[in-house]
Every structure is written in structure tokens, then in C-alpha cells.
Image (cartoon, coloured by chain):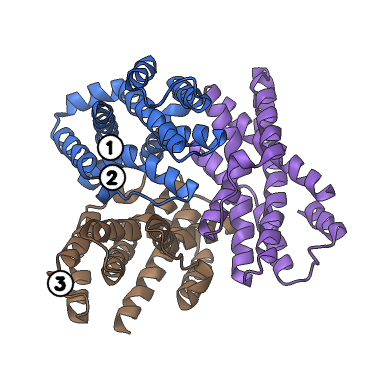
Chain colours: A brown, B purple, C blue
Amino acid sequence: MAWEIVNIIAVAAFAFSGAIVALSERYDIFGVFILGLAPPFVGGIARNIFLQIDVVHVWEQGMFLYVALGTIAVVYFFPKSWVMFWDRWNVYLDAIGLSAFAVQGAMFALEAELPFGAVVFSAIITGVGGGVARDVLAQRRPMVLHKEIYAVWAMMAGVLLALGLVDYQSTVQLYALFGAT
Amino acid sequence: MAWEIVNIIAVAAFAFSGAIVALSERYDIFGVFILGLAPPFVGGIARNIFLQIDVVHVWEQGMFLYVALGTIAVVYFFPKSWVMFWDRWNVYLDAIGLSAFAVQGAMFALEAELPFGAVVFSAIITGVGGGVARDVLAQRRPMVLHKEIYAVWAMMAGVLLALGLVDYQSTVQLYALFGAT
Amino acid sequence: MAWEIVNIIAVAAFAFSGAIVALSERYDIFGVFILGLAPPFVGGIARNIFLQIDVVHVWEQGMFLYVALGTIAVVYFFPKSWVMFWDRWNVYLDAIGLSAFAVQGAMFALEAELPFGAVVFSAIITGVGGGVARDVLAQRRPMVLHKEIYAVWAMMAGVLLALGLVDYQSTVQLYALFGAT
């Protein structure tokens, strides 16, 4: 439940970052919604396609979808100066989403009892996929590949979970991990 | 049958736009064919992968493939000045392909009796996927996200169909919808 | 067995080219590893997803994965001047990887007894996919689409195999094909 709240914050942060990027690239309303939805959902969908398990579709994600749509709608009416301001802080929003999703990806693979390599892979794809999709659609260089050494920590989180050093059922440790990244 | 003709026009328009973009980016013959084939076929393939249904492969699409290849071959021998001319009008070619494919995507999801969200999603992916793939491969900012408010109408078409406001078996209404977008 | 060695060389060449591109774009260590792993593995994974057969995951590819990771690690410690030097020769590294993977993709489809169109498609996706993924992630125009007329030869290799002009069990002919491309 409490972990659910972290997830909602991560979805909102990712949707926020996507909408801001779209606005600062002067995309239209359609572009703002597509770029806002890409970061929180593409990572998970890509992971499921790669792992060839059932895709949980965007329209089945209930509350997460409404949180994302609500965030994008709010950002869309931001004045221009706010957009410029937030675009500079985007790397932090991205780091929040990335680390929460990387941990979620690792947990997902662990619960499916996949091997070590799959846990690392799942953590990377789930965490990184959305932000990369946003940056490619905005024709920017993917932030995670040159600006965010954070990403390495997200990967580490996956590795730690995979090694069983962190008990993934212990919520306290999850928060510690999340705080550290 | 008559709807088939609209589809063939859409495939030709999309193949035309891809080949023009490749030529104006000075891509070689291989690039021209890849960028010409991407717009008409990537949207449908991406939709099928996302929805995890059987992919109808490019080489199984018979007449559509020949129409696309023929269009690309013709464009390849255009003089340079024609290419510059058409590149400016590309947004209209894109709008033709986009709206026809969005309607086709929505019909596809309706026939498979998928829920409302899936119909909207299918209309967007089928209509937008190809053009985005073309623009990413050409390292341009995806036209649909910043220039084409048309895309929103294509999405609307999907929504209308999903709501059952338009009877998708009525060919007349399909043309009206297509004309409107 | 001897064909295995060609494959290892191709994996190393592709990983090398990805790491060099990442370094010359000043990506961080995470970016270098992602861009190094993308060329040798994305093509095969994309082909398997498109053909809807079981994906052989990156972490299951044993020796090939170690070869790629080793190559990337070595490149990461190159002095800056070497990187600039190799970036200019990248087109040759790319051609090695591309032609070996295109032949491998065609053989793969032939062994699965897929139709002619699928063999051509498989050769193109397997050969071209990785390099395109690398260039999109680096925000460069895909090299294969404008610089490498080699790619057409790789495609030809697939076509030749598909037509049965070359017996794919004859290793000698495979080398000849590989040498020619």
C-alpha cells in the first residue's frame, strides 16, 4: 500500500517530465499527451514484450493512468516561464521515476522467479525505457545515457535485489533503497 | 471493396512521404526503400505486437506491398527539385495516411471486440506509428507531435467508432469520417 | 565451429562500434555499456519479436555476452585521441557486423523453413537493427541508411540464400559470401 504511493509519485514525476519536455519543444496538445504518457508506461510495456509475458495495457492501469493524465492536464496549462524553469530540473524528476521503476522492474522479475540476468535486464528496461522513449520522440539525446549516473544506481538496486541482499518483501528496506537512489 | 481503395491510397501516400523524406535527407537507395516501407507497415505491426495478436507480416500483405514498392520506385527517380517541392507538402500526405490508418486501427479493434481503451489505443498506434518511425529514422522531430493537430482528429475518429456513434459497417459514414479528417 | 568465430568477430566489431559512438558523444559509463550492447543484440531480439518466436535473451547468450562486455570494457579505457580515430573508421566495423548478422539472420529463417519474404526480412532486421538502435540512441542519422551501400549487399546475401543459389550448409560458400560483403 505504502509502496503504491511511491509508485504513484513516480508515475506523476515521469508524466510531469514528459509533458514539460514536450512543451519546451513546442509540441502541440497531442504531442504533450503522448510524451507525458510515454515515460510512465513504455518501460513496463517494453519489458513485458521482451520477456514475452502478458502485456498489462495502458488502459488497464486504472489509477496510474488517471494520475498520469491528470498531471499532464495540469502541466499543459503552465505558463511558459514555468516550463523553462522545470525543464532545467527535469533530471531530478527523471531520477525519481527511474529509480522507482527500476526497483519495481527488479521486484517484478523476482516474483516471476526469473534468473539473475533477467532481474538486471528487467530493472534496466523498466527504469530506463520510458525516459529513452520520451527523449527519442523529442529528438533529444537520451538523458539517462549521458547525464544520469543515477541510472547506474538504479541498476545496482536491481542487482542488490537479485542477489537477495535486500529482502524485497521488507518495505522498510525498499524505502531505504529508493531513498539511496 | 471501396474501402480497400481508400486503404491503397493511404499506403501510397505514406510510402510516397517516406521516400520523399529519405531523398531530402540524401539517404541512399537502401534508406529510401526502408523509409518508404516504414510508414505504411510499422503502425500495424506495432499495434499487433502491443496487442499480442498474430502479426500480419509485411511480406504477407500482397497488393499493399506492391503498391508501396511501386510508389517508392517511382519517387526514387524524381528530379531533385520535385523532392524539395513535395517535402513541403508532406504534412498533407501524412494526414491522408494517418487518418485512414487510424480509422482502420479502430475498426480492427472493434471487430476483435476489444474494450474502449484498446480501440483508442489501436487507432493511435496504427495511425501514428508509421509516421513516427519514419521521422525517428530520418532524425527529424516527429511531425505528428508538433505539426499535425490532424492527429487529434484521427484519434477522435477512433473514439467516435468506439462509442458506436458511427456504425462501422456503414461504408458511407466511413467515407464521411475519412473526409472530415 | 569456424562460423562461430566469424560470429564472435562480428559481435566484437559491433560492440566496439557502439562503445566508440557513445564515447565520442561523451556519454557516461552507463551509456557506453548500453550503446555497446545494443548493436550486437538488438537486431536478433527485434527479429524474434517480429517473427513471434521465442526470444533468446541477452543474458542467455553466454560467450557472445562476455565478448561484448569485454570489448566495451577495453574501449572504455581508450584515450580520447583513439576514440576520435576509430569514430572515422566506424563504417567498416559496422559493415563487418552488419554483413555477418545479415547472413546469420537469413540462415536462421531458412532453418525455420520460413517463406522467401521472411528470409529477406530476417536478414535485413538482424543485420540492420542493432546499428540503427545504436544511432537512434546516439541521436545520429542511422549510418546504414545513408552511408552504407554495403547494406544492400547484405540484403543480397539474404536473397541469394533464400533462392538457394548458395547452399547454406556449405561453410566455404558462407565465407565467400561474407568476404564479398
Looking at the rendered structure, the secondary structure element under dot 3 is: loop
Looking at the rendered structure, the secondary structure element under dot 1 is: helix
Above/below status of A65 relative to A1: above
Q: Is residue B146 visible?
A: no
Viewer-side residue, C91 vs B89: C91
Q: Are marks 1 and 3 in contact (CB under 8 Å)?
A: no
Which residue sits at x=76%, y=71%? Answer: B164
Looking at the rendered structure, the secondary structure element under dot 2 is: helix
Position in image of residue C110 (x %, y %): 46, 34
Quadrant into which the C terminus of chain A falls: bottom left
Residue type at numbered disc 2 = Ile
Viewer-side residue, C166 vs A164: C166
Host chain of mark 2: C
**Mark pair 2, 3: CA separation:** 25 Å
Quadrant into which the N terminus of chain A falls: bottom left
Q: Which mark identifies residue C22?
A: 1
Earlier in the chain: of badge 2 and badge 1, it is: 1
Which residue sits at x=28%, y=37%? Answer: C22
The residue where tag 2 is placed is C34
Above/below status of A176 relative to C136: below
Q: Are marks 2 and 1 in contact (CB under 8 Å)?
A: yes
Host chain of mark 1: C
Host chain of mark 3: A
Q: Are marks 2 and 3 in contact (CB under 8 Å)?
A: no
Position in image of residue A105 (x %, y %): 31, 65
Label 2, residues with CA under 10 Å away: few <14, some 14-19, many ≥20? some
**Mark pair 1, 3: CA separation:** 32 Å
